[in-house]
Image: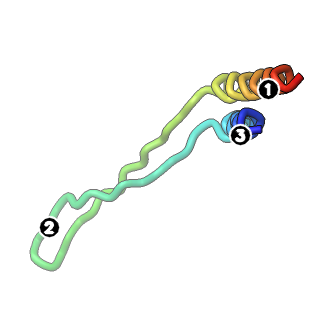
Amino acid sequence: MLTRIVGVILMIVGVIMMVYTGYRYVTTKRVVYLGSIGVNQDKDHYIHWSPIVGVLLFIVGVIVIVSSKKERK
């Protein structure tokens, strides 16, 4: 039962990684600080992964589910 849940989770994460190939986040850094006046700089960061990773996770999830059915018999 637990292996089937792990397999389904792997499949769901694999599909999500195929659809969304990355994400972006912004950090703020204080560049200049003069008394009560400050200048901030926003910097974009992008985390990117290949959709092939999602396909591999999906395939591994299917293999885990199939192997859990074989163990049950």
| Residue hosting label 2 | 33
How many C-alpha atoms fall within 10 Å of the one at disc 1: few (<14), some, or many (≥20)?
some
| Residue hosting label 1 | 68
Per the model, the C-alpha gap separating discs 3 and 1 is: 14 Å
Residue reaching furthest to the front: 73
Examine the rendered structure and indicate whether residue 43 appears above or below residue 17: below
Residue reaching furthest to the left: 35
Residue reaching furthest to the right: 73
How many C-alpha atoms fall within 10 Å of the one at disc 3: few (<14), some, or many (≥20)?
some
Amino acid at dot 1: Ser
Determine the image quadrant of residue 22.
top right
Indicate which disc residue 9 carries. Answer: 3
Q: Is residue 48 left or right of residue 9?
A: left
Per the model, the C-alpha gap separating discs 3 and 2 is: 47 Å
Contact flag, marks 3 and 2 (Cβ < 8 Å): no
Determine the image quadrant of residue 37.
bottom left
Per the model, the C-alpha gap separating discs 1 and 2 is: 60 Å
